[in-house]
Image (cartoon, rainbow, N blue to C red):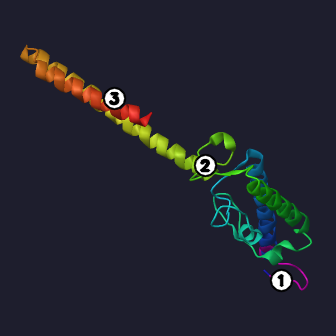
Amino acid sequence: MAYQKGKTSPEIEAKSNEITHSIIEKTRLIREAIAHKSIPEYIPLNKTKTKLNLLDVHAWESKELKIVGYSYNATITEKNKPHSANLKSAIFKLNEGLANNNITVTVGKCENSNSGYKTRAQLELENKELKSMIEKLDRQVVELFRAYLQLNHFIKQNGFENRQYHELLKLHCQTENQYLSKVK
């Protein structure tokens, strides 16, 4: 592709749009944390978890959240000035809330789906884990039923009822029930 003098290349325009989108998205995420009065782990607070620094926000990047890191100079362009002002305002309000203990910092990953903090990738991973657990439980239920039928057939075929076999079957069922209870 031939570049024209005085024209911005499509790659640079795409990168500029990506930075603008990231500034807007970071502002939205910070305001959402302020509204919920809870800061998720992915917002880059300082080491003591007492403050959010502007430069840390600019460097913050996440593929899951579809945000990129950028330099401070990228925020002072005419295109990004209003978005940068909104971002600074959101950071100020968040730091004010942290200083006044109006906002709490969540420890670990946000598990509260009502808070709106889970990303699509986190939900997909959770869904995959739950499907795997369901498949495992299905296999165990089938195995338990097969063992029951086999034992029942053995008892009927040999024409006797042995208390030891019944205790073994009962113990096996209790073990499986304990595992199912843990899963719930």
Which residue does the numbered mark 3 point to in the structure image?
177
Q: Check if mark 3's residue and mark 2's residue have beta carbons within 8 Å.
A: no
Q: Which residues are magenta?
A: 2-11
Which residue does the numbered mark 2 point to in the structure image?
110
Residue, far front: 100
Q: Is residue 6 magenta?
A: yes
Residue drawn at x 88%, y 64% is 85
Where disc 1 sits, the SS reads: loop
Residue 142 x %, y %: 31, 30
The CA span between labels 3 and 2 is 30 Å
131 w.r.t. 157: above or below? below
115 w.r.t. 153: above or below? below
Residue 23 x %, y %: 79, 64
4 w.r.t. 132: above or below? below
> Is residue 167 found left or right of 141 in the rendered image?
left
Dominant secondary-structure state across the stretch colored magenta: loop
> Is residue 34 found left or right of 139 in the rendered image?
right
Compare residues 158 and 89 and report the one nearer the observer: 89
* Mark closer to the chain start, 2 or 1: 1
> Is residue 3 found left or right of 121 in the rendered image?
right
Which residue does the numbered mark 1 point to in the structure image?
3
145 w.r.t. 50: above or below? above
Residue 41 appears in the figure: yes
Residue 177: quarter of image? top left
Where disc 2 sits, the SS reads: loop
